[in-house]
Image: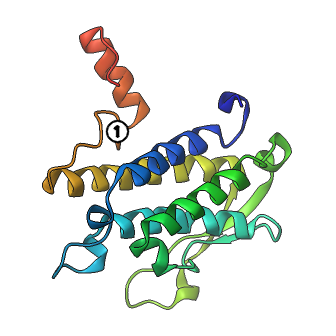
Amino acid sequence: MDLAMLPAGPNIAVLQQGLDLIRRLEDGLYEPETGRPQAGGVGMQFRHGMDFYFCLLAGLDSGEVDYECRQRDDRIAGDRLYAAERMEALIGKLETINDNDAGRLIRTRGEAPAGAGHDSAPWAASSVLRELQFLFSHTVHHYAIIRLLLAARGFETGQAFGVAPSTLRYWEQQTGHPAV
């Protein structure tokens, strides 16, 4: 399948990168370190990013995407094999988004500030394609955190993991060599 032809192609590619990493990890690296809060774990970072995609997909029919109403499936955060299954399913759903879907106008609501009620966050006009662009950047950002968490535990993710494509292109221009 030519991902460049799909509106969610960049998202699928970055999620596939994450799926490949999940499959390479041992359970002990995926789960949070003993004595550390689960928020510090690699699995929690993957879960957080996937939650945002699930929100987008859940809101496609209604045209309203509320990112505060995330599933927060803790099993994704703690069970590497289950996370891989959910990531595969997510990729499969993103493959079905077509150009008509991508051009649809939708409303989105982000998170309210801490201490404020959920309804205090305003709704904003957007499109499915714009949200896919946001989710791509959000995913790369959390992959950078995953990269740091794993490096602290002695695991190398690969040079391109958690690095924005524009940064990879810049590095290539500077060195004359692919950064991958």
Residue 166, horizontal then vertical, whole percent: 41, 29
Q: How many marks?
A: 1
| Residue bearing the label numbered 1 | 163
Residue 146, horizontal then vertical, whole percent: 30, 55
Q: Is residue 67 above or below residue 21?
A: below
Q: Is residue 124 visible?
A: no
Foreground residue, 116 or 44? 44
What's the amino acid at mark 1? Val
Foreground residue, 49 or 110? 49
Q: Quadrant of residue 55?
A: bottom right
Foreground residue, 168 or 133? 168
Q: How is the image coloured?
A: rainbow
Is label 1 in a helix, a strand or a loop? loop
Q: Is residue 158 above or below residue 88?
A: above
Residue 157, horizontal then vertical, whole percent: 29, 43
Q: Is residue 111 left or right of residue 169?
A: right
Q: Is residue 74 visible?
A: yes
